[in-house]
Image (cartoon, grey):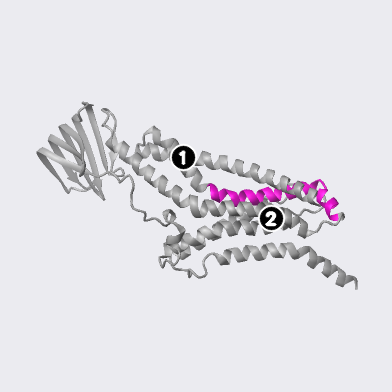
Amino acid sequence: MRILQRYMVREMTLNFVGVTLVASAVMLVNTVGQVLARAAELQYQRRFVLELIGLSAAGNFAMLLPVGLLLGLVLAFGRLYHDSEMAAAQAAGVGLGRISVAIWLLVLPVTVLVSWLNFYVGPRTSIAEENLRNEALRAGILAPIEPGRFRSFSDGRIVVYARAAAPNGDLTDVFVDRSEGATIDTTVARRAHYSTSYQGEIITLYDGERVEGVPGTARYRIMRFVQQLIPFRAPAANGAITRPDEMDTAQLLGSRDPRRQAELQWRLGLPIMVLVFGVLAVPLGRLRPRQGRYAHVWLAVIAFAFYAVLAQAGRSWIERRQVPASLGLWWVHALFLAIAMGGLLQPLLVRRWHARRRQ
């Protein structure tokens, strides 16, 4: 029987790894698109892009393991049932207990891996990604302004254009557009100087004209000036940790903040999801004679989708105090565990029902 269990573990592991690699490739393509779009919008330098892609993908990898495990187990069982190998094993006396041992030999290491990624790697990856984004923003802001190209600062609220630029930061024929709410502030100047200091970054404009007003209305004013300063500040390279997903788990324990409570429930939820999927995969992978090996894959996809949606909704409800933190996401896990146990007990209940009918 140990030979059969090793064979089943190998079959499940190969399917799990294959599904996870495919899902990782799809996620990586999506991550590349998002990072490139953000890099183009915020003018990141090229040296930051690859590292940001890697950190973003690493932060999302823990979410792929539960779905990879569920689909891998269902695919493995589908092949075993379709090729009548499971029927032969059951005819030889292999029961649910020995099959479960093979399943948990895979599920438990995956649970440990997800726990490590979620509790240890995830917060550190979030901190590193946030710091790298701020560093990329600072590098973009502190880089010299290139003539003939628009540069944006302060999350796009300040846009600067210069027809010509000198290596020392002097600019000529400068256009600056600033927006704050509905008010638009447009400034043109004959020349300007871009400089940085310990207090921040400053554009000094000389010999220009400034028009301030609200588009679509007659409320505006025109000012001429000899010199004008436009200060702005780049984000800190290593800011304070304020987001719950960047905090260590020890900081989340015992907190009364609903956002931290929701984050703690989410971190606990992924390893529990893996354990629930280990139980749910058995009834989902069970096939009737002449069913195709992929017959229940769509059920596994729907099960994961509903699980993830309910968990996200529960997390949002905890953050808004619509659900008490003591209830957390436990109701989601209990619901799917009850469904899994019902599926496991279904054959036994059906046999008992038929036996009573024959009596």
Amino acid type at mark 2: Trp
Dot 1 crowding, Cα within 10 Å, few <14, some 14–19, many 20+: many
The span shown in magenta is 61-90
- Judging depth in this view, the residue of 77 and 5 nearest the camera is 5
Q: Is residue 12 visible?
A: yes
Residue 81 on the magenta segment: yes
* Residue 81 location (% of width, % of height): 79, 50
Q: Look at discs 2 and 1 and give the one toward the viewer.
A: 2
The residue lying furthest to the right in this view is 359
- Residue depicted at x 87% and y 69%: 355
Rendered residue at 51%/58% (across/down) = 267
Work out how far the residue at label 2 is from the one at label 1, CA to CA, in angstroms.
33 Å
Residue type indicated by callout 1:
Ile
Res 294 seen here: no
Whether residue 184 is in magenta: the answer is: no
For numbered disc 2, what is the local secondary structure? helix
**For residue 241, side relative to residue 195 (left or right):** right
Q: Nearer the viewer, residue 288 or 248?
A: 248
Residue 285 in picture, x, y percent from top left: 73, 53
Q: Which residue is mark 2?
A: 104
Would you place residue 32 above or below residue 73 in this image? Answer: above
Q: Secondary structure at mark 1?
A: helix
Q: Residue at x 33, y 40 (%)?
A: 137
User: Where is residue 135 shown, x and y percent of the image?
Assistant: 34, 41
Residue farthest to the left, as pictured: 226
Q: Could you tell me what secondary structure mostly forms the magenta stretch?
A: helix
